[in-house]
Image (cartoon, rainbow, N blue to C red):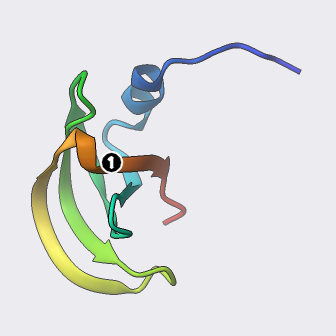
Amino acid sequence: MDNEIVSGSEVLSEALGNIVLVKLKGGRTIRGTLKCFDQHLNLVLEESIEINEDGKELKKLGQIIVRGDNVVLVSPSKL
């Protein structure tokens, strides 16, 4: 088993251009294409959609900036 430690910025760099799920403080979840990020975890997402726990679309958001201090989790989307 490989116990290599990978930094968060390396993981986000690999996710650039791909669809990610972003969980926010307050329980909201957004799915969109990760276009860029910075050292504060501010994210730019394109074609973003707010979704519920079942993955159903609640609202189309388009291109957005997510402030890093609101981000709880970023993960690859299964779609």
Q: Which residue is rendered at x = 41% and y = 81% of the image?
A: 52
Q: Which residue is rendered at x = 28% and y = 86% of the image?
A: 58
| x and y, in percent, of residue 45 in the image | 20, 51
Which residue is most to the front? 26
Q: Which of 9 and 40 is in front in this view?
A: 40
Q: Which residue is rendered at x = 48% and y = 28% of the image?
A: 11
Q: What is the secondary structure assignment of the residue under circle 1?
A: strand
Quadrant (top left/top right/bottom left/bottom right) for the N terminus: top right
Number of marks in the rendered image: 1
Side of 56 where 57 appears, left or right = left
Which residue is most to the top? 4
Give the vertical position of 64 relative to 16 (above or below): below
Which residue is most to the right? 1
| x and y, in percent, of residue 48 in the image | 22, 64
Residue 43 quadrant: top left
Q: Which residue is rendered at x = 24% and y = 40% of the image?
A: 68
Residue 5 quadrant: top right
| x and y, in percent, of residue 60 in the image | 17, 77
Give the vertical position of 28 relative to 59 (above or below): above
Give the vertical position of 40 relative to 78 (above or below): above
- Which residue lies under the disc numbered 1? 71
User: Callout 1 environment at 10 Å: few (<14), some (14 to 19), or many (20+)?
Assistant: some
Q: Which amino acid does label 1 sit on?
A: Val
